Amino acid sequence: MDIKKYVRVIVTLILTLITMTLIFLFSNQTADESTVLSTNVTEAIFWWGDIDIYMVAEHFVRKAAHLTEYFVLGSFLMLHLTSIGEIDLRFDKKKIFVFTMVIGIAYAISDEIHQIFVPMRGPVITDVLIDAVGVLLGALFVRALIEKHRRKRSDNGSKKG
């Protein structure tokens, strides 16, 4: 039994749950609180812009936040499920990818449903689509890193022999 594999499963699970909690907390902000946060970020990035640029930029900052949150979630989900796959060999690459997408998109949908109950907030279908793209990009990013790491280890092993 390789204890490192089990530790990896636990650590990646904790990182995934922390990410989900942060997403929940951001979604739990009222519309006014959310606006203050996105306004501060937009002002920090576009301090030099005029009001027209600023108004458009704020919309993109909000959508980029969705993409980024779910990129991180997709990355951690992929890492977590891959670490499970190292223990349970029946859990292959395809299943890992499908489960990553299903869990990530289900969480995005539940996040939008949650916003029904937050003052002055509501569900937006385009946010679920942006979130799904974030999960996809995060999963693909991690998959590419894993493959690169495995190739590198394989190449190093063949050079030693």
Image (cartoon, rainbow, N blue to C red):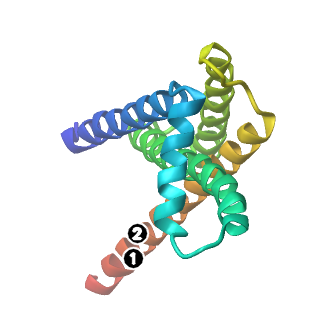
Q: Quadrant of residue 151?
A: bottom left
**From this viewpoint, is residue 91 visible?**
no
The correct choice, above or below, for 160 with respect to 93 in the image is below
Residue at the image point whose x is 67% and y is 65% from the top: 51
Label of residue 38 in the image:
none
Q: Amino acid at mark 2?
A: His
Q: Secondary structure at mark 1?
A: helix
- Relative to the observer, which residue lies in front, 109 or 39? 39
Residue at point 39% right, 73% down?
A: 154
Seen from this angle, which residue lies furthest top?
117
If the image is split into quadrants, where does the N terminus sit? top left
Does the residue at mark 2 contact the one at mark 1 (Cβ under 8 Å)?
A: yes
Instruction: Report, in whole angstroms, how far the alpha carbon at label 2 lies from the one at label 1.
Output: 5 Å
- Determine whether the residue tagged by mark 2 lies in a helix, strand or loop: helix
Residue shown at 54% from the left, 62% from the top? 141
Q: Which residue is mark 2?
A: 149
The amino acid on which the numbered mark 1 sits, given as a three-letter code, is: Lys
Residue 58 image-quadrant placement: bottom right
List the residue tagged with mark 1: 152
- Residue at the limit of the structure toward the bottom, as seen here: 159
Q: Is 71 in front, or is 7?
A: 71
Q: Residues within 10 Å of mark 1 (few under 14, many from 20)?
A: few
* The furthest residue to the right: 125
User: Could you tell me if residue 55 is visible in this image?
Assistant: yes
* Viewer-closest of 111 and 12: 111
Residue at left 54%, top 37%? 34
143 to the left or right of 60: left
Q: Position of residue 38 (x, y in %)?
A: 54, 48
The relative height of residue 85 versus residue 108 in the rendered view (above or below) is below
Numbered marks: total: 2
